[in-house]
Amino acid sequence: MTGLRCSRCGKPICPQCAVRTPVGLRCPDCAGVRGLPTYRTPASSLAKAAGAGLAVAVGTAILWRFFPEWQFYLCLLMGFGVVETIARFSGNKRGADLQLLAVGIVTVGFLLSRVLLAQRFGISMAEVNALSPSISGILQLRFIPDVVYALLAYLIAWVRFR
């Protein structure tokens, strides 16, 4: 049995459960310990957000086809553009469903941009599957900086809806 009691209600509490407050130790009920609010986004709002985010991802992929040397800025546009569009169309909610949606749409945008780059430079699927160093350079599939920039867009998508 513990001698430690809540400073508000007097209920016995274990030292691991005690919450430090400016007026002393309290039990979790009196301290008001709550997690961050996350919401289940309604399906209609999720569908609108997915459509708008997909439109931004496709637009960014098309830009990528014409300006592949602007890769860093296009990765930022892919991350922030898709994520903020999804946030606006979902009513600025957060949650795991929006995280997964944003990561999925960013993935679609990156895949589409690589397909469009392959089309622009006349690279066949057999050459893509062989993945020679020259092809990976053209399609921007090297680890540094290409994958690092892509990870930046994924990080933006994950953190925004946390």
Image (spheres, grey):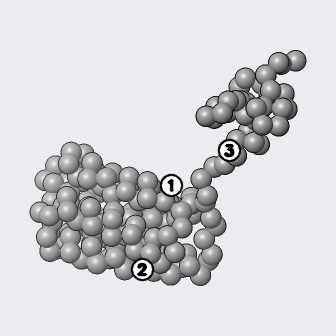
Of circles 2 and 1, the one toward us is: 1
Q: Quadrant of residue 156?
A: bottom left
For image coordinates 66% across by 48% down, the residue present is: 34
How far separated are the C-alphas under marks 1 and 3?
Answer: 18 Å
Mark 2 lies on residue: 52
For image coordinates 20% across by 75% down, the residue present is: 63
Q: Quadrant of residue 138?
A: bottom left
Mark 1 or mark 3, earlier in chain:
3
Secondary structure of the residue carrying numbered label 1 = loop
Q: Residue furthest front?
A: 23
Of circles 2 and 3, the one toward us is: 3
Picture quarter with the N terminus: top right
How far separated are the C-alphas under marks 2 and 3?
Answer: 36 Å
Q: Is residue 88 left or right of residue 70?
A: right
Residue 70, numbered label: none
Q: Quadrant of residue 150?
A: bottom left
Mark 1 lies on residue: 162
- 90 w.r.t. 36: above or below: below
How far separated are the C-alphas under marks 2 and 1?
Answer: 20 Å
**Percent position (x, y) of residue 19?**
67, 33
Mark 3 lies on residue: 33
Secondary structure of the residue carrying numbered label 2 = helix
For image coordinates 70% across by 41% down, the residue present is: 31
Tag 2: Cα neighbours inside 10 Å, few (<14), some, or many (≥20)? some
Tag 3: Cα neighbours inside 10 Å, few (<14), some, or many (≥20)? few
Tag 1: Cα neighbours inside 10 Å, few (<14), some, or many (≥20)? few
Disc 2 marks a residue whose amino acid type is: Ala
Disc 1 marks a residue whose amino acid type is: Arg
Q: Is residue 135 shown to the viewer in this render? A: no
